[in-house]
Amino acid sequence: MHEELTWADATAQADLVRRGALSPLELVEAAIERIDRCDPVLNAVISRQFAAACDEAAAQLPEGPFRGVPILLKDLGAVQAGVPYCEGTAFAKAAQYRGEHDGYLVQRFKRAGFVVLGRTNTPELGTAITTEPRAFGPTRNPWSIEHSSGGSSGGSAAAVASGMVPVAHGGDGGGSIRIPASCCAIFGLKPSRGRVSQGPEPSDSWGGFAVEHVLARTVRDSAAVLDQIAGYLPGDSFAAPAPLRPFAREVGADPGRLRIGLVDHAAQDDYTVHPECLQAVRLAGRLLESFGHTVEVAHPASLGEPEFRRHFLVVVSTAVAASLRQWSALLGREISAEEYEPVNSKLTALGRSLSASDYLESVLWLDGFRRRTLAFWSEQGFDLLCTPVLAQPPARLGELSDPLQGEARELETLRFTAQFNVSGQPAVSLPLHWAPGGLPIGVQLVADYGREDVLIRVASQLEEATGWVGRRPPVHA
């Protein structure tokens, strides 16, 4: 039963509770045992709520569809009342700061029946694509402990991939669900902008680019959880179009014959894509053709616009500078530049050097970029776009966090994800390829705005055809 339960997805675990085969407390205690056994190697869970979780599981839980299923929350977003909250920062850790309320997303997780076991590691302020914060140390990849688990939801991805929990919360402002899903060979869906409320906090995190969901091992879990957490709440800046039916019903549904663009080369002239990443995309293209879809080498021309990085950086750096002002207000003192990591010191300095007109210029440019990008779907008639998630395989720990060369290496790697945070489109990372040596390589599919249903249908086709759920990393619970 131990092995079976370790790899049972959230849907299956919830079914065990409904049938009376296991109690919520037994599910929670088993997950705690897995974390205790596996986390000393991976360092994915930085804050534990085990006693409170056991008390909650033993009490009367809400009769939601995931009653009794254990979950971990990323320590960035999903604020909890009375629980340590650091966003990967040393200053919040030292102050022992705790959340003042349960965010709307946490309320919806609990209403669905999930039991929160703790919080997962994330890079400082979520600004890196590797999870190596100085405050908590690096999270290691279950497929190779010398490699990064990705970021910024790297702790959550490692926890799910290693079997600690079936699903874990993540956020994505530039690829932070899809990148760790790619590095750890699990399924990561970034929903459409406005699909999941971020309230009662401001709903324009990183200029509205950031969204939240979970990382999962199965498509059906991702779809079913999205049904529970999606939906407009008063005060949200955006509301994604309501689905025609529950997302869970799209799993296994026939997507019809789709027209799919494929990127099998660099979209800009100033960088290259690793051959294994291109190999992964070409493999996906062949699989999609075998399902009857039409696959063409094509992509939005906007992906080749070199100005994108500068304008995206303006918005992000301004958001980081504002975040540090907010932390100063929360802690009741000014946080000095020496208290945060060099990358955030640099971003803060840039954000503070910009004028309001600089910021607005970039916001307007990115608005035009969004319209130019979406034309690939609305005017050119494509249903999906298939790209690499990353331009390079998972990096070794220390390569992307290196103070001298890390930024350049990160720019070489981060080429295909942030564009779709700006466009607001839903996108997934699919674990379809492993490079020699066993490192996972994810493939990204992007749908039109509001069309998570199309992604779920096609992702379930690929899941069934490849059997990725059955693969186990060397480090697992």
Image (cartoon, rainbow, N blue to C red):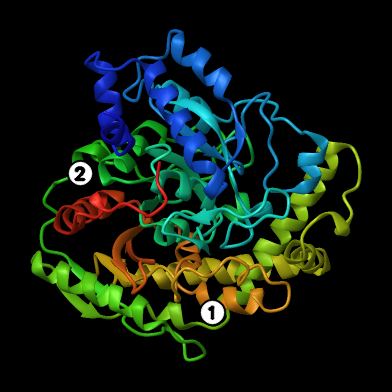
Q: Which residue is mark 2?
A: 250
Residue 324 visible: yes
Image quarter where the N terminus lies is: top left
Nearest the eye: 427 or 98:
98
Q: Amino acid at mark 2?
A: Glu
Nearest the eye: 282 or 417:
282
Give whichever of discs 1 and 2 has the lower sequence position. 2
**Extreme residue in the bottom direction:** 269
Image quarter where the C terminus lies is: top left
> Does residue 78 sit above or below 218 in this rendering?
above
Disc assigned to residue 412: 1
Task: Report, in whole angstroms, how far the alpha carbon at label 1 lies from the one at label 2.
Answer: 35 Å
Left or right relative to 73: residue 97: right
10 Å crowding of disc 1: few (<14), some (14-19), many (20+): some
In the rendering, at what x and y percent does residue 268 appear? Answer: 46, 86
Q: Amino acid at mark 1?
A: Glu
Residue 46 sits in quarter: top right
Q: Secondary structure at mark 2?
A: helix
Q: Nearer the viewer, mark 1 or mark 2?
A: 1
In the rendering, at what x and y percent does residue 389 appear? Answer: 40, 67
Left or right relative to 88: residue 238: left
- Residue visible at 73% across and 72% down? 403
Left or right relative to 446: residue 296: left
In the rendering, at what x and y percent does residue 67 appear? Answer: 36, 20
Q: Secondary structure at mark 1?
A: helix
> Does residue 234 sit above or below 369 in this rendering?
above
10 Å crowding of disc 2: few (<14), some (14-19), many (20+): many
Q: Are marks 1 and 2 in contact (CB under 8 Å)?
A: no
